[in-house]
Image: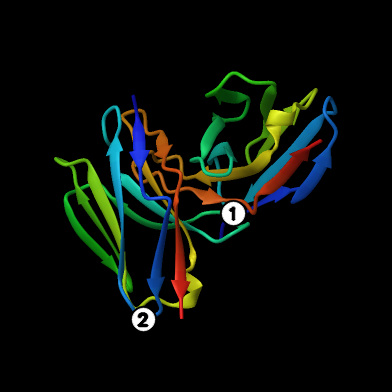
């Protein structure tokens, strides 16, 4: 069966510090991969998605970046965090077939920037 | 622009029925999704509608009217564990999901 894991689950970082969130998927090949951010009272905001190794699409301009060094690994990074980067970050995957579109989410990473 | 509207919060009684409404405006349409999200956890998939009508899955049903840009999620025989946020999301012509802010459902005994 397919599984998705992301870490760390919780982190508190000072403004200006770097960030690295990691996500891995097991049990499937060539998944579509996504990074979302969820702010209180707002819908899920798509940050990045990837349809293959090294292929990253960015949905919003920001100080975050994403990389996909391996087929089932997706990393969200920042060189210098801002207060506005605080939130609940979710990694997700879907089958490469676009028709279904069902997303499978990781456990989430709660980031607090102080 | 693209938009998903759903109520912020609803309250219902254990054992009762509740209907959570969602209206959507997307650039093109490739389906409507409902997800359940318990507090502090990741969303989990509930249903997908792409054709008009009612899809039933156990205690949960989802309805779609494409002409009205409208969907609802119907929960029957409510249980305390159904207390969660319910997220509505529309898929646009680029197969991207547009998410609503979620409806927090509070179940009272």
Position in image of residue B38 (x %, y %): 55, 61
Furthest residue in direction left, as rendered: B67
Residue B62, by quadrant, is: bottom left
Q: Which of the two discs, 1 and 2, sits closer to the camera?
A: 2
Q: Which mark is residue B40?
A: none
**Mark 2 surroundings: few (<14), some (14-19) or many (≥20) residues within 10 A:** some
- Where disc 2 sits, the SS reads loop
Count the marks: how many? 2
Which of these two is toward me, A6 or B18? B18
Position in image of residue A30 (x %, y %): 54, 39
**Residue plotted at (85% across, 28% down):** A17
Q: Quadrant location of the C terminus of chain A?
A: top right
Position in image of residue A90 (x %, y %): 61, 44
Q: Is residue B109 left or right of residue A70?
A: left
Q: Chain of mark 2?
A: B
Q: Is residue A41 left or right of residue B3?
A: right
- Where disc 1 sits, the SS reads loop
Query: Above or below — where is B8 with respect to A59?
Result: below
Residue assigned mark 1: A27
Residue assigned mark 2: B15
Q: Are marks 1 and 2 on the same chain?
A: no
Q: Chain of mark 1?
A: A
Which of these two is toward me, A91 or A71? A91
**C-alpha span from label 1 to label 2:** 38 Å
**Residue plotted at (46% across, 75% down):** B108
CB under 8 Å between callouts 1 and 2?
no
Q: Quadrant location of the N terminus of chain A?
A: bottom right
Q: Is residue A12 left or right of residue A89?
A: right
**Mark 1 surroundings: few (<14), some (14-19) or many (≥20) residues within 10 A:** few
**Residue plotted at (70% across, 37% down):** A86
**Residue plotted at (33% across, 24% down):** B1
Position in image of residue A6 (x %, y %): 69, 48
């Amino acid at each position: 069966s397919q599984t998705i894991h992301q870490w760390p689950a919780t982190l508190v970082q000072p403004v200006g510090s770097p960030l690295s969130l990691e996500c891995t998927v097991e049990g499937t090949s060539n998944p579509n991969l996504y990074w979302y951010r969820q702010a209180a009272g707002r819908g899920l905001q798509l940050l990045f998605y990837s349809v293959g190794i090294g292929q990253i699409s960015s949905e919003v301009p920001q100080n975050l970046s994403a990389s996909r060094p391996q087929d089932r690994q997706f990393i969200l990074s920042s060189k210098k965090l801002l207060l506005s980067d605080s939130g609940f970050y979710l990694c997700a995957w879907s089958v490469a077939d676009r028709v279904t579109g069902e997303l499978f989410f990781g456990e989430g990473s709660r980031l607090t920037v102080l | 622009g693209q938009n998903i509207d759903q109520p912020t919060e609803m309250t219902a009684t254990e054992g009762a029925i509740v209907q959570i409404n969602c209206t959507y405006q997307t650039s093109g349409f490739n389906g409507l999704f409902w997800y359940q999200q318990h507090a502090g956890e990741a969303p989990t998939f509930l249903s997908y509608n792409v054709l008009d009508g009612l899809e039933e899955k156990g205690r949960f049903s989802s309805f779609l009217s494409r002409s009205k840009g409208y969907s609802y999620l119907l929960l029957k025989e409510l249980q305390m564990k159904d207390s969660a946020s319910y997220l509505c999301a529309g898929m646009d012509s680029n197969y991207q999901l547009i998410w609503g802010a979620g409806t927090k459902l509070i179940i009272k005994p």
